[in-house]
Image: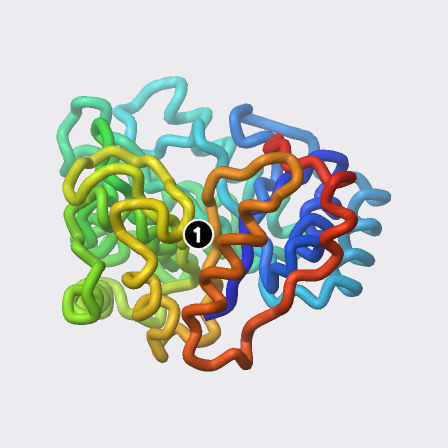
Amino acid sequence: MIFGAHCSTAGGVHMALRRAKSIGASLCQIFVKNNMQWFGQPPSKANLGLYQAELAASQLVHVFGHAGYLINLGAPSSKNRDTSIKSLVQEIEFGTLLGLPFLVLHPGAHLGSGEQAGLDQIVAGLDEVFSATKKSPLRIALENTAGQGSCLGYRLAHLGDIFDRVDQPNRLGICLDTDHFFAAGYDIRTPKRWDATIKEVDQLVGADQVLAFHLNDSKTDLSSRVDRHAHIGEGLIGKEAFRHIVNDSRFKSTPGCLETPKSKDLKEDIQNLGILRSLLKSKQLATKPRGRARLKTLSATVD
């Protein structure tokens, strides 16, 4: 597995790549606009130029996006759901300008209408979004969820149902979050249970559809249905569980992205990346942290 972290684009999208480089990451996840606003401005030509130059110099193996948190395709018909569709279309357009391969997306919440009704809405919403972005090669990586509230995607069967029914499954992939797995009731702490979980992924969607992992420990217990990320080895999943996860040969070249809490100097990202790399049986894909002296000048604020 190849390791990196979600990085802030404060100061320009190119700054996320600099932050990733400063912590020794091999990949970077970004928001393509403010994640708590419906709409934003596309990157200017100048900012695109800075981004492309930084990307060429960074030697990052992967850069991909995460969709905004307001988007909810699973909601009943409403103004907010209509806005969610328009917002996701815009994010795909921005991601396409940046040359991103995919955007990670929380499937959505049914808000009381029931799981099947919510899944129907997600399928219809994705069909509408893909139809509006026909020229874009960018894919949507549906993320498994902890199942908090009425959020869908906490069962792998939900993701399988969406894949089975969308008009363009080739535009889909999945992103698997370790914390969300655990909180939803998938006990991934042993190699046997991890293999059983990935077998279910393969049967329902296809293991080859896994575009990325979010590597997070969990502050809450198995089946809690509460989404609270912890640093690697400081949660209830535990450090040893990540040993068999990061060494799974099926995902040797798959992005493994941290979404753990961080302070402005990003020291937690460096520590978590160090722990993950220490668990690898082969160090061939490991990247040593670089540029620690520059950390004080790089804000970790999420925009």
Q: Across the whole image, how many numbered discs are drawn on residues?
A: 1
Expressed as whole percent of the image width and height from the top left, the position of residue 178 reads 32, 53
Tell me the residue at 74%/40% (across/down). 296
Q: What residue is rendered at 36% in x and 46% in y?
A: 234
* Quadrant where the image shows the N terminus: bottom left
Q: Is residue 71 left or right of residue 90?
A: left
Task: Identify the secondary structure beneath mark 1.
Answer: strand
Instruction: Report the front residue among 264 and 173.
Output: 264
**Coloration mode:** rainbow
Where's residue 292, x and y in %?
72, 53
Q: Amino acid at mark 1?
A: Ile
Q: Which residue is mark 1?
A: 140
With respect to residue 169, does 106 lie above or below? above
| Quadrant that contains the C terminus | top right
Q: Is residue 2 visible?
A: yes
Where residue 259 appears, as percent x and y from the top left, is: 47, 45
Give the residue drawn at x 52%, y 61%. 274
Instruction: Please report the residue visible at 44 percent of the width from the left and 27 percent of the height from the top.
Output: 70
Against 232, is 9 above or below? above
- Whole-percent x, y for residue 114 in the image: 13, 30
Residue 120, visible in the rendered structure: no
Q: Is residue 12 left or right of residue 89?
A: right
- Mark 1: few/some/many CA within 10 Å (<14, 14-19, 20+): many
On the picture, is 186 further left or further right than 169? left
